[in-house]
Amino acid sequence: MTHVKSRKVKRYCLHVYICCFIVFSCCFTLFFSTRHQFQTCLTINYDNETIDRYDEWQYQNSITGQWYPWHITYDYQETDVKWNVKWFNTEPVSYLGVIVYLAIHSEMKELRLSLTQLSRLLVNNPRPVVIFHQGDFNDNITQNSLAQALGPNTPLGFEQINFPNKSNRLKSVHRTIHLGYFHMCRFFTLMLPHHPLLRLFQYYWRLDAHSYIFAPTPIQDPFEIMQNQQIQYAFIMVNEEADHYVTGLWSLFHKFLRDRCLQPSLAFDKTQTGWFGGYSSAMIFTNFAIANVSIFRDHYLIRAWLKTVDDNGGIYRYRWGDAPIHTIAVTQFIPRNDIVRLRYFGYFHRREYVCTYGIHGKPCREQAKPFFMETPKGNEEYDDGCFPSTWNPLCHYYREIRL
């Protein structure tokens, strides 16, 4: 009996030893693999990352007529030749900020109205406007007509660019979307900040041909507000992206973070992470956005993220837009205090609109009515500039400037 009991004790001790060995081995492996991963992350200096390539896209100088391949580089030399622009109306008196459009000739009517609104609301401090195009605005009659819409005190430039007629990238799963739309998404996602024109300015304000700012009286210059308050990024409306337009984007960004041993920021968790750790799909309405040029060109983690997106091909494959791509970037990498939402004037885009803070309902509709392109029922006021409601996590997360 004693002998049997002794055998059981020995067997029990052996099991304990084996379990301890397994636990110790797992801890040892985890510790050193984590330590190795941590050391690997520390030894990579992403700020010294060299990205210097020439793209198939091209841009033309408006004075010399010479074409250049789009140069994606993060090693700009101050001795590089300054980009010259053929300005209509007058030369810029300040290079603090520039307002940019990407337009086609069929949007001429909407573009003219958008420019007219700029001239009215920025009459006290006109800012240069540049229209990027693919040859649609080369004739003198069109150029002079748009210059007149802005008035003699607002500089206007035209920059011709060339998108390829075919793309070597993966075919889109959305076969009904024109190739030009994918080019537009890529243009605003990462190509625009690398155009040499943007080297002349500190900020750029992106608008669409269907973008109209409005208010009863001229507004304070947003570029000066951003400079005085050291703001890096400003927006006005928020929305949600459809799930089928962000296929794979969420997992790609988390892999991007893991590869660099990074954790999601608090702002990213609050605004981008939804139920059960999934994607909230909340995004900034980037058809109106003002940004410091450097954040999408010189911030080493943002430029690495944009390169990852471009290399993935999701813009062309799944129609990833610049809105979700940039929203992910700024919520993760730009401090919360450096981002604001502008609420001291109204904004209208296609059918959606928001008025100055505190103006809702019928008074707001009356202000926006001149921009209704369809019946009033087809236009929608965003509650506080937020869709589908003020419950959108981006709605009131960032500081608002109301004046």
Image (spheres, helix red, strand yellow):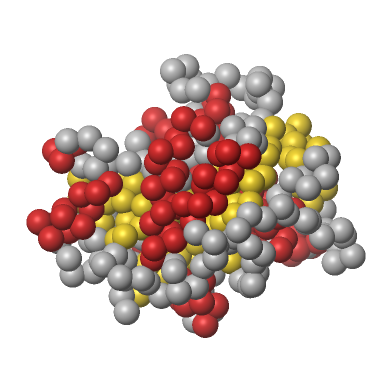
Residue drawn at point x = 78 percent, y = 56 percent: 83
Q: Is residue 66 above or below residue 14?
A: above
Q: Position of residue 2 (x, y in %)?
A: 45, 51
Residue farthest right in this picture: 79
Q: Position of residue 206 (x, y in %)?
A: 51, 53
Quadrant of the image containing the C terminus:
bottom left
Residue drawn at point x = 67 percent, y = 55 percent: 87
**165 and 231: which is toward the camera:** 165
Residue farthest left in this picture: 362
Residue farthest bottom in this picture: 228
Residue farthest top in this picture: 175
Task: Give left or right: position of 192 versus 289.
Answer: right
Q: Position of residue 341 (x, y in %)?
A: 37, 67
Q: Position of residue 101 (x, y in %)?
A: 53, 47
Task: Give left or right: position of 130 versus 112.
Answer: right
| Tally of numbered discs | 0
Residue drawn at point x = 20 percent, y = 49 percent: 369
Q: Is residue 271 above or below residue 143?
A: below
